[in-house]
Amino acid sequence: EDVILTHPSVKEVAVIGIEHPESGQVPKAFVVLQDGVDEHLAILGIKALVNEKVASTKQLRGGVVICAELPKTSSGKVKRSELRKHFGP
């Protein structure tokens, strides 16, 4: 998440592990973009950044999903269980 947040198009991000038939679990990123950012270009840029900065096992093989907002608790923490439930594989 820290690496993805360094991308200038990214406003917020949460990464969860999702089931993968061959690899067990793989990372999937849920991203809220800054206003006016092209989604397609942002996804390409985020993937390139992650591929450059992290080990192959932590690369976003589960994909990148653009969201209008991330589900949060009243204290502002991301509800990862909601991401798994509503946006999972």
Image (cartoon, grey):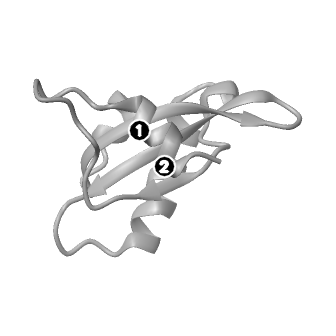
Q: Nearer the viewer, residue 38 or 31?
A: 31
The numbered mark at residue 86 is: 2
Q: Is residue 4 left or right of residue 68?
A: right
Q: Secondary structure at mark 2?
A: helix
Q: Residue under circle 1?
A: 82
- Dots 1, 2 in contact, CB < 8 A: yes
Figure check: 84 above or below 7? above
Q: In percent of the image, x 67 and y 43: which residue is there?
A: 61
Residue 19 on image: x %, y %:
72, 34
Which amino acid, by three-letter code, is at mark 2?
His
Dot 2, how many residues are within 10 Å of its Cα: few (below 14), some (14-19), or many (20+)?
A: few
Snapshot quadrant of residue 9? bottom left
Q: Nearer the viewer, residue 61 or 71?
A: 71
Q: Nearer the viewer, residue 2 or 67?
A: 67
Q: Is residue 77 left or right of residue 56?
A: left
Please identify the quadrant where the N terminus is shown: top left
Q: Is residue 32 left or right of residue 1?
A: left
Residue 68 on image: x %, y %:
27, 61
Q: Is residue 69 left or right of residue 39?
A: left
Outermost residue, right direction?
A: 22
Q: In percent of the image, x 28 and y 42: which residue is there?
A: 71
Between marks 1 and 2, how big is the CA–CA gap?
Answer: 6 Å
Q: Secondary structure at mark 1?
A: helix
The numbered mark at residue 70 is: none
Which amino acid, by three-letter code, is at mark 1?
Glu
